[in-house]
Amino acid sequence: MSFLFLFLNLWMPATSISMASLSAPAPSLEAESQPVLSGASLASLATDIAPPEFSPPPISNITTSPALEPSAYYIKEGSNMTARATGFAPYEQVQLSRGTKMLGAATATGGGSAEFAFIAPLLGVTFEITAVGLESGAKASRIITLAQ
C-alpha cells in the first residue's frame, strides 16, 4: 500500500490522496441466519433418507433330512456312549434302537433334536443304531464299529 502512495505522490505531486480513500471497505461480520432443525424435523429427515426395509424369505418351506450323530464311530464294547438325532419334527417322540432292541425314547426339542445315552453291546464287530420319529416316520441310521 505504501508503494502505491509513493508512486502516486511522485506522479501527481500536487494532488493529496489519503490512505482512507485507498483502503477497501471493511468486511461485514454479520452472521447469516441458518434454519434450526428441531427433533420433529430431524425425524422426518431421517425417514426421508431411510433405506428400504428388507424382508427375508420365509423359512417354513425348508425341510431337513433327519441325521444321527453318535459320540464315537469306534468304541470299546460295553462302553457308555451318546447319540444326537436332528431334523425331526418339533416335540415329536423319537425312538433309538439297535436292531430290534429299543435303546431309549426322547421328545425332540422345538428345534427337532433329541439326545440319547446307551451302552455299546458286548458282542459283535459292528452294530447299527436307528432313530425313528413316531409321528412323522422320519428315520436316520449310523453304523458303529466295536474296537477290539
Image (tube, rainbow, N blue to C red):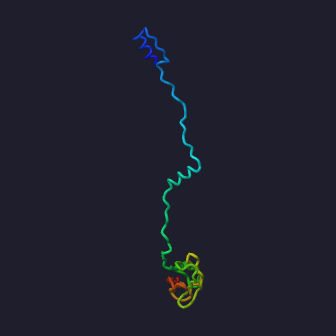
> In the displayed structure, would residue 48 be above or below residue 106?
above
Q: Residue at x 56, y 75 (%)?
A: 111
Q: Residue furthest left?
A: 11
Where residue 83 appears, as percent x and y from the top left, is 56, 80
Q: Residue 107 versus residue 144: which sits nearer the camera? A: 107
Residue 52 screen position, x and y as percent: 48, 59
Nearer to me, 76 or 95: 95
- Give percent across and percent down for residue 23: 48, 21
How many discs mark residues in the rendered view? 0
- State the residue in front, 77 or 39: 39
* Depicted 124 relative to depicted 18: above or below: below
Most foreground residue, 108 or 143: 108
Task: Using the image, determine if residue 131 lies above or below residue 32.
Answer: below
Residue visible at 50% across and 18% down in the picture: 20
Q: Could you say where residue 80 lies in the image, as x and y percent from the top left? A: 59, 81
- Picture quadrant where residue 106 is located: bottom right
At 55% across and 34% down in the image, what residue appears?
31
Q: What is the residue that sits farthest to the bottom in this orientation?
A: 100
